[in-house]
């Protein structure tokens, strides 16, 4: 039930005092992906200060009921491209909070010459109001990303013993990232491998490379990343100048909502078509099951048919679609090759 309409004010974020309240609003508005105050703090700490970013909260009788932010799209940077997000607590909807946040944030980036603003929402019921909100303001869907889920207790983990035996015979060892801690070049090799693999992921956007230091903080040093459940394919006899013997990897993280998520799975071009990626995921799933098991969620862009097929073979079931929305503020901006 909505609150009686009450006045509210927009103000800047007070860090770190507002982090708990921001986490509450974001988790309530997007219960599918809850966040904690600690995660909010890491987002602020890891943000590239060279890129533009602005964030506001809506406060109503001393309570934060809405939060919105917009800034340069650090994943696909162009000076004129921005990525935004907006959440209003369900208790405070229908009172103009979201509209006020949106109007002010859009004004700020338009003053900077913004030509494009992006965001992402799912097809799930809790995002229906947000989708309608965007579509009324001229946003359009330009990309789809599919979500699939699998609980390790229901996975056919014993059906691929022959695949793992073939990996061993082919000189490929599947080693957890945690076990590779003794390799002084581990972090740099994984950084180089991750960037090489991302070049071949069909994501519908030209990617921007993060610095080595940022990547390590956001990936390997993220306390939610389970390095003991994330695996690297190490091929004997390979010594790439950038990635050494690392030819592929898969990462697994944990969300306080009670599930795990796959961050990246990929194999260098020279080793594709041999089952290495499937073996990596299988090793990760087996390790998770051995540690108590759990639900895994994974996300793949619609054109990535090879990975979608592999996930289906492993037992994943598609559960949702996420849509990337874009608002084009300059009709003369040319479409990028997809």
Image: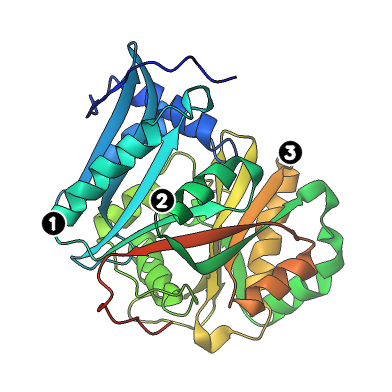
The percent position of residue 258, horizontal first and vertical second, equals 64, 35
Give the quadrant of residue 192: bottom left
Q: Which residue corresponds to the image point at 65% horizontal and 43% vertical from the top-left?
A: 125
Q: Which residue corresponds to the image point at 34% horizontal and 50% vertical from the top-left?
A: 84
**Please, what secondary structure does the residue beneath circle 3 have?**
loop
- Above or below: residue 172 compared with residue 6: below
Which residue is labeled 2 in the image?
220
Work out which quarter of the rendered image holds the C terminus and state it. Answer: bottom left
- Above or below: residue 259 compared with residue 242: above
First in sequence, mark 1 or 2: give its number: 1
The percent position of residue 126, horizontal first and vertical second, equals 60, 40
**Please, what secondary structure does the residue beneath circle 1 have?**
loop
- Above or below: residue 45 compared with residue 185: above
Which residue is labeled 1 in the image?
112
Badge 3 crowding class, 10 Å Cα cut-off, few under 14, some 14 to 19, many 20 or more, is few
Badge 1 crowding class, 10 Å Cα cut-off, few under 14, some 14 to 19, many 20 or more, is few
Say whether marks 1 and 3 touch (CB < 8 Å): no
Q: Is residue 65 visible?
A: yes
Q: Which mark is residue 292?
A: 3
Q: Is residue 46 visible?
A: no
Q: CA–CA distance between discs 1 and 2?
A: 34 Å
Q: Which residue corresponds to the image point at 63% horizontal and 66% vertical from the top-left?
A: 280
Work out which quarter of the rendered image holds the N terminus and state it. Answer: top right
**Please, what secondary structure does the residue beneath circle 2 have?**
helix
First in sequence, mark 2 or 3: give its number: 2
Give the quadrant of residue 310: bottom right
């Amino acid at each position: 039930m909505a609150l009686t309409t009450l006045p509210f004010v927009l103000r800047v974020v007070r860090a770190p005092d507002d982090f708990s309240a921001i986490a509450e609003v974001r988790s309530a508005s997007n219960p599918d992906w809850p966040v904690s105050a600690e995660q909010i703090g890491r987002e602020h700490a890891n943000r590239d200060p060279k890129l533009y970013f602005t964030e506001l909260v809506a406060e109503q009788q001393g309570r934060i009921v809405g939060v919105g932010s917009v800034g340069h799209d650090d994943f696909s940077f162009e000076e004129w491209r921005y990525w935004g997000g907006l959440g209003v607590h369900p208790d405070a909807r229908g009172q103009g909070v979201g509209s006020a946040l949106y109007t002010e944030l859009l004004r700020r980036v338009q003053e900077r010459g913004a030509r494009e603003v992006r965001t992402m929402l799912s097809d799930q019921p809790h995002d229906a109001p947000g989708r309608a909100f965007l579509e009324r303001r001229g946003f359009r869907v330009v990309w789809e990303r599919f979500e699939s889920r699998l609980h390790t207790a229901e996975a056919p983990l014993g059906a691929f013993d022959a695949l793992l035996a073939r990996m061993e015979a082919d000189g490929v060892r599947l080693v957890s990232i945690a076990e590779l801690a003794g390799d002084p070049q581990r972090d740099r090799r994984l950084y180089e491998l991750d960037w090489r693999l991302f070049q071949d992921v069909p994501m519908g956007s030209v990617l921007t490379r993060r610095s080595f230091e940022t990547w390590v903080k956001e990936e390997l040093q993220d306390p939610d990343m389970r390095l003991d459940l994330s695996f690297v394919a190490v091929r004997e006899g390979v010594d790439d100048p950038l990635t050494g013997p690392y030819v592929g990897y898969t990462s697994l993280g944990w969300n306080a909502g009670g599930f795990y998520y796959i961050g990246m799975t990929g194999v260098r071009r020279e080793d594709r078509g041999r089952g290495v990626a499937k073996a990596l995921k299988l090793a990760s799933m087996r390790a998770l099951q051995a540690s108590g098991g759990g639900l895994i969620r994974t996300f793949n862009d619609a054109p990535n048919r090879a990975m979608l097929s592999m996930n289906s073979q492993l037992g994943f079931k598609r559960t949702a679609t996420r849509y990337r929305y874009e608002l084009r503020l300059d009709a003369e901006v040319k479409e990028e090759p997809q």
